[in-house]
Amino acid sequence: MAKPNYIELTREVRIPILYEDRSVIALDKPPGWMLVPISWQKTNWNLQAALLSSIAVGHFWARSRNLKFLKYIHRLDAETSGVLLFARSQGALHSIGEMFETRRMEKVYLAVTAHALKQKQWSSQLGLAPDPRRIGRMMADPGGKPAETEFRVVASVGGRYLIEARPYTGRQHQIRVHLAEAGCPILGDELYGGGHGELALRAVGLAYRDPFTRKPIVIRAPVSEFLSQHGFSSGAYRVEFESVAASSRRNPSR
């Protein structure tokens, strides 16, 4: 029997597999799942724990791949959907995790805002730090950890703006804070002034050079449903990547 192209945690929960090789598995994470619960009430929505439990009981998706190890390499906020990369071994976790830390991983997101933008393309380099006034919230802080994101408006319709975001660092809530500070919080981002509803932020692509084979790896998440959900045509955007080698042009910074 062929390996399923999804992870089945329960009969109601199937998570699509976007890409896999001997080192990694990339999932299309649904919104609502977190990797590190901030409270015990959220434990049932811990994706890492759910995957390990599924592997331990021998669900077919895991048995068919002879999986013994699976660990997230980077994180997405609970409310964010899209590409999430997992390592299939400790060696892959270390080697590919280092690529995230040293800016050799090209990451692309889509966000939607209802606020008009003065510019079509810009870069934010605001440092980020925890907000002492509210647990779980971040804030712009010149003395905080360095953070850099490039933004580009790719479409607009009915007072909504589709923004491509390319973060070169991986700080908590980086895209959300940078957009809020630019006066255009993401739709549904209650924490940063975007109102109620589902967060309109999706991780749509990853690209890197495999540290073991040196082959370029490109991973894309579907975008048509996200686009139509927010009033954009299915052809309004396609994920494009720079040269994989070019992603190392910046000096590492942690």
Image (spheres, rainbow, N blue to C red):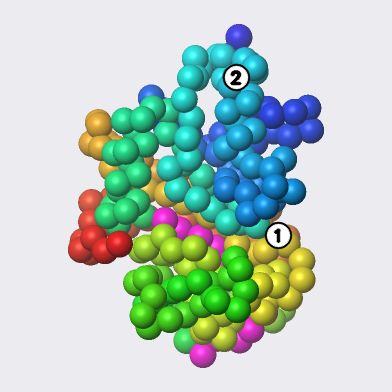
- Mark 2 residue element: helix
Mark 2, other Cα within 10 Å: few <14 / some 14–19 / many ≥20: some
Instruction: Answer whether residue 116 is magenta in the image.
Output: yes
Give the residue drawn at x 23%, y 56%: 248
Q: Disc number at residue 240?
A: none
- Circle 1 is placed at which residue position? 228
- Mark 1 residue element: helix
What amino acid type is highlighted by mark number 2?
A: Ala
Residue 238 versus residue 188 in the image, above or below:
above
Q: CA distance from mark 1 to mark 2?
A: 38 Å
Residue 49 versus residue 140 in the image, above or below:
above
Q: Earlier in the sequence, mark 1 or mark 2?
A: 2
Residue 241's spot in the image, x, y percent?
A: 37, 55
Give the residue drawn at x 67%, y 64%: 199
- Circle 2 is placed at which residue position? 56
Q: Which residues are magenta?
A: 107-118
Q: Which of pointers 1 and 2 indicates the residue nearer the eye?
A: 2
Residue 95's spot in the image, x, y percent?
A: 29, 39
Instruction: Answer whether residue 233 is magenta in the image.
Output: no
Residue 209's spot in the image, x, y percent?
A: 28, 42
Left/right of residue 39 with respect to residue 207 in the rendered view: right
Residue 56 versus residue 149 in the image, above or below:
above
Mark 1, other Cα within 10 Å: few <14 / some 14–19 / many ≥20: few
Residue 180's spot in the image, x, y percent?
A: 56, 80
Examine the image and state in which quarter residue 184 appears.
bottom right
Left/right of residue 214 with respect to residue 121 in the rendered view: left
